[in-house]
């Protein structure tokens, strides 16, 4: 199998050649079948989009102290698309995200690639190169043997996840197609489990369930051992019904995984036929790091008044 190669296109944007597939940040607007999918599933038509943009602008203007790029169409669309262009629903998530930033600066300040470099180099956060036939991204979070809490703190791990989710939120195709998340627990040990408290579990699930504008298609727990029951007990009380319905305990039952994710999108180690080498962490980090300027813009947004009352976590 061919090796992974980091390359740049004619505009200087990095991408990774992985056998027959390419992994890159896809910032171009939707076309082809994505347009039809967006219309059928998300109500995306010119009139609906225009009305939704004006609607969310009005809501933002009415929110004291919230500073976001009001006239940045791409910024607004990343909230509107996953919420089917209902301005109130999209704004609710936007508001909760920036309330999260206000309440938990430890996990949300300086969300720049350089602050989470080690998590990417160690391949704790990982993207597969090929989208599903429905257009969904596939992301893997490896919190077992690849995660050394002494080198990558839980704080850095959470920030790395937020950096990765921002990539998913910013890609128009992912806004339409959604995201599948593989939670790889191969090598999970007590040293990992003891990093989590009920309070942290509650906060992490608040982020995933309420604060991120992503069409979450499914979360798949793979390679888990019996010890996983200990960490699941910590998270279970805070799981909303919607996420419960999208949570699948796979273990090593790859046939079940392939019911949800196309076989040709999965590597052989997960029962798939993907014709690509694994993406080295240093290559993925260099792609993410190239877009630092985007993250530097994003960290400027949020609430700027002390009068903003932080959102309670339910």
Image (cartoon, rainbow, N blue to C red):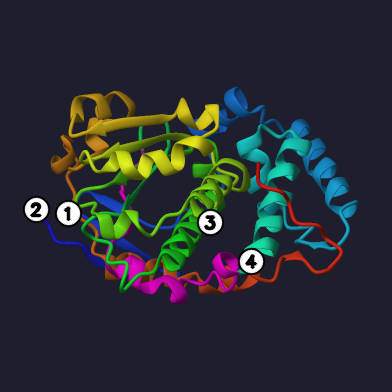
**Label 4: which residue?**
298
**Label 2: which residue?**
1
Give the side of residue 163 with respect to residue 65, left or right. left
Q: Quadrant of residue 156?
A: bottom left
First in sequence, mark 4 or 3: give its number. 3
**Label 1: which residue?**
277
3D distance between C-alphas at marks 2 and 4 = 38 Å
Q: Which-is-in-front pick, marks 2 and 4?
A: 4
**Is 47 rendered above or below residue 302?**
above
User: What residue appears at the point 71 percent right and 41 percent down from the top-left corner?
Assistant: 90
Residue 128: in magenta span: yes
First in sequence, mark 1 or 4: give its number. 1
Residue extent of the magenta highlight: 106-131
Q: Say what secondary structure mark 3 lies in.
A: helix
First in sequence, mark 3 or 2: give its number. 2
First in sequence, mark 2 or 1: give its number. 2
First in sequence, mark 3 or 1: give its number. 3
Number of marks in picture:
4
Residue 85 visible in image:
yes
| Quarter of the rendering occupied by the C terminus | top right
């Amino acid at each position: 199998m061919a090796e992974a190669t980091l390359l740049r296109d004619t505009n200087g944007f990095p991408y990774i050649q992985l056998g027959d597939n390419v992994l890159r940040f896809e910032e171009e607007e939707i076309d082809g079948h994505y347009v039809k999918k967006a219309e059928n599933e998300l109500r995306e038509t010119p009139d609906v989009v225009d009305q939704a943009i004006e609607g969310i602008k009005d809501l933002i203007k009415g929110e004291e102290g919230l500073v976001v790029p009001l006239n940045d169409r791409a910024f607004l669309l990343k909230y509107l698309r996953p919420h089917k262009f209902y301005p109130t629903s999209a704004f609710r998530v936007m508001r909760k995200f920036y309330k999260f930033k206000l309440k938990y600066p430890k996990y949300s300040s300086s969300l720049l690639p350089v602050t989470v470099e080690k998590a990417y180099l160690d391949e704790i956060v990982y993207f597969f190169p090929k989208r599903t036939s429905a257009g969904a991204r596939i992301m893997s979070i490896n919190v077992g043997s690849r995660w050394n809490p002494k080198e990558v703190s839980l704080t850095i791990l959470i920030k790395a996840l937020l950096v990765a989710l921002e990539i998913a939120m910013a890609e128009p195709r992912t806004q339409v197609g959604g995201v599948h998340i593989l939670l790889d627990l191969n090598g999970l040990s007590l040293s990992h489990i003891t990093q989590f408290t009920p309070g942290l579990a509650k906060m992490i699930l608040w982020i995933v369930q309420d604060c991120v504008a992503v069409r979450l298609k499914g979360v798949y727990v793979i390679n888990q051992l019996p010890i996983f029951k200990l960490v699941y007990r910590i998270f279970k009380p805070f799981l909303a019904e919607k996420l419960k319905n999208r949570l699948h305990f796979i273990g090593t039952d790859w046939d079940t995984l392939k019911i949800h994710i196309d076989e040709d999108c999965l590597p052989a180690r997960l029962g798939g036929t993907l014709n690509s080498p694994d993406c080295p962490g240093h290559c993925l980090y260099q792609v993410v790091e190239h877009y630092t300027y985007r993250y530097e813009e994003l960290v400027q947004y949020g609430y700027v008044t002390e009068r903003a009352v932080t959102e309670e976590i339910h």
